[in-house]
Image: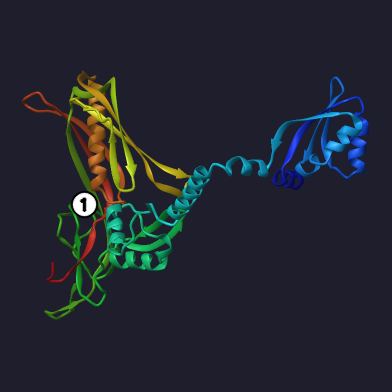
Amino acid sequence: MLLLRLWNYIRGYVIIIVEGYFLEKFVNICTKRQIYLWDIKKQKNSKISLKISIKGFKLLRPVAKKTRCRVRIVEKRGLPFIINKYKERKTFVLGLAVFFVIFYIMLSFVWTIEITGNEKVETQMIIDCLDEIGVRPGVLKYRINTENVANNIIIEINQLSWVSVTVKGTKLKINVAESIEAPKIIPKDIPCDVVAAKDGVIESLVVKDGYSLVKEGDTVKEGDVLISGSIPILNEESFRTVHAMGEVMARTWYESVQPIHLNVKEKIRTGNKKNNITLLFFKKTVPLFHKKVGYEEYDKEEIKKPLSIGENLVLPFGIVLEKYHENRIVEAKVSIEEAKEAAVDAAYEEILNLMSEDSQIVDTKINFLEDSDGNVYADVIIECIENIGIAKKIGGN
């Protein structure tokens, strides 16, 4: 059915009204003469509406004359009528053709670069690397060898372990995986000691190789030798050097002192705002009626809206909307409990940034101190158990 409708549209057809007293005879004669009629609908006052092809319509005059029926066209549909309508408008047709040619040409270039997967490596570093090998917005996408681009990025940026490069529409998609930095390990054939990475009290000690210089309960300071790689030889005054190894778990403490502020500054939006619009045209920007901001305190919000068709067909045109929201800075007084809670949270955040990932928290102490000037502070001490032993070359740094 759909194919038939499409075929009729390509050939072209008309919707007509037939009036007369011999409508049934009109339809029978058309059928006998193989004039195809469809969608015949009966109307009031001896009328019917129907659809007929252009070729069939040209054969209706003798039929209408023989049955004394009047025929009038209600609507013309189909491709032939569209072509006939615009064939005299040569400028329009030419412009439409030029538009499609330009549009096709523009789809042959890369207009945007999307980089994902990077956390530590800056996006700009990857973009600069691409620029050095000639890959940038505006490059012909058929000239991009994705495999070569990926290899060049990995060679130039050591922090990346894997790079995938694909071209989708007018977008160059680059997905990367960052290298995990391996800890510096002293080779086993080099003699070394195990020393304390920080102050602590020894909780447990497991010696795999070497000579233990500490025991459970001992207090050690950063840099103290815990397991020596110089093992004394029995009944001799000499030493045998080895690569000392072991696990030294110790109790460690982290402390942070944060001031308690009862008066805090807050930003409150006044409701006043200004919008500036900038047109993007390839790499150029064209400001449109930019207003002077004039606010002493404000938040800026920038929204880029490139012209795109779907997700991957991004064109080098668009707008940038800059929104400026005026703020008013006010001082607010908070309760002592809220102020203490904020100071404790700040202390926790500072300590957690100092702790290693394998640290096990066993105790937390929170004290509030007041100095001679009446200033109050939150003193947070966190007690952990962690491995404090690190390898150090004997006689080295």
State the SS at label 1. Answer: strand
Q: Residue furthest left?
A: 372
Task: Look at the image and tell me in which quarter the N terminus lies.
Answer: top right
Q: Is residue 358 above or below residue 135?
A: above
Residue 207 in view in this figure: no
Residue on which the image places disc 1: 201
Residue, x 19% and y 25% (percent of image)? 294
Task: Look at the image and tell me in which quarter the C terminus lies.
Answer: bottom left
Q: How many marks?
A: 1
Q: Nearer the viewer, residue 345 or 80?
A: 80
Residue, x 58% and y 42% (percent of image)? 86
Q: Nearer the viewer, residue 330 or 42?
A: 42
Is residue 276 shown left or right of residue 51? left
Percent position (x, y) of residue 176? 38, 58
Percent position (x, y) of residue 162? 38, 63
Is residue 65 shown left or right of residue 259? right
Percent position (x, y) of residue 248? 26, 59
Is residue 55 shown left or right of residue 285? right
Q: Residues within 10 Å of mark 1 (few under 14, many from 20)?
A: some
Is residue 381 shown left or right of residue 64? left
Q: Amino acid at mark 1?
A: Val
Instruction: Look at the image and name its color scheme.
Output: rainbow
Q: Is residue 123 above or below residue 337?
A: below
Q: Nearer the viewer, residue 116 or 173?
A: 173
Q: Quadrant of residue 290?
A: top left
Q: Quadrant of residue 156?
A: bottom left
Residue 30 in view in this figure: yes
